[in-house]
Image (cartoon, rainbow, N blue to C red):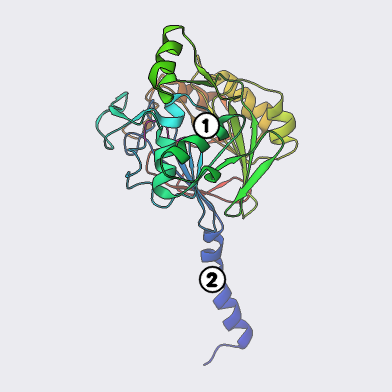
Amino acid sequence: MAQPHAARIALALGLALPALALAQNVKITPLGTHDGEFCPQDRALVIEDPNGTRILYDPGRSVAGANDPRLGKIDVVLVTHMHGDHAGNTHIKDVNVGECGKPETPVSAMPNSSAVNIALAKKAKIVTGSEMQAFFAAKLRANGGQATDSLLARFGGSQTVGGVKIATVTAMHSNGLDPDYIGGPTAEAMKANGFAGYVGDATGYVLKFSNGLVVYLSGDTGITRDQETVVRGYYKAKLAVMNIGDGFTTGPAEATYVIDDLVKPNTVIPSHANEAGTQGGKVRAGSKTEAFLKQVKTTAVVPLSGKTMEFDENGKCAAGC
């Protein structure tokens, strides 16, 4: 017997709604040095909006250059600051070479950086804050690209690319430019005198995606008042990527305070552990990653390289965690 019209509609919707819900998730794929692990040099994330816009966050040393097959289409490159482990002064030759605890990054990306080389190859925009925009514009122009593909988002302002709103937020960290990015006699004189170039303040980012999800990318930072007043109070971030490495940034205890007491997202992804956080895909006993997971009350998801996670508009994991 034929189904009633209303039942047919309900059945059709019942079949269609799960696919629609899945399509509305933001996808995050870590690109680390070793598949299925969380290793010392791992910073890079590919973040994909439901509309298909793909953002590469801090390519660092764990992306095997512009030809890394894991990259796929990249529309935007975000760089928090110019240190080599974020902009990419060197990088791996291939995935899974060497040990997770001691990844090999023998390929130089100087004087351009992996960020520039990838942006050129993918015809992507580079979005940064402070004086980094001018630096990247000059690099793009010098290599046959368009200087206008380097976009500026100063504190309090934003850029919207591919339907994703990108704003910069405070990060308390140094941001010296290695003289080797400049080269020639000027670079040699700077190195001889212990000077680095000035490219403005380091930054973090807040991204708002087309499904409404707001994500805080901490970059390298200590504890700041803006994490409460700006990231939580104004932007209302529901998902955070937080550095936990200590020494150069917040450690596990400080990062826990930032997440649980200041930002208060629904989910946090630890980053920048500066050591092997996992072994065989499991959290390594005695690691900073384990220390953070034990202390933090917010739901935490360890970023395993190559494993795609999906998050809904409330920053809660919908798949892959």
Label 1, label 2: how many angstroms apart (C-alpha)? Answer: 47 Å
Query: Looking at the picture, how far across and down is residue 321, in whole percent?
Result: 46, 44
Vertical placement of residue 4 versus 210, above or below: below
For marks 1 and 2, the one nearer the N-term is 2
Residue bearing the label numbered 2: 16
Q: Nearer the viewer, residue 45 or 265?
A: 45
Q: Can residue 179 be seen?
A: yes
Q: Judging from the image, what secondary structure is the residue with disc 2 in?
A: helix
The stretch of residues the image draws in magenta is 58-62
Is there CB contact under 8 Å for labels 1 and 2? no
Query: What amino acid does circle 2 point to?
Result: Ala
Vertical placement of residue 168 versus 200, above or below: below
Please name the residue shown 47% across and 24% down the image. 83
Question: Which residue is farthest top?
Answer: 193
Query: Looking at the picture, how far across and down is residue 152, in whole percent?
Result: 61, 39
Mark seen at residue 135 = 1
Magenta stretch: includes residue 102: no
Total count of labels:
2
* Helix, strand or loop: magenta stretch: loop
Q: Quadrant of residue 88?
A: top left
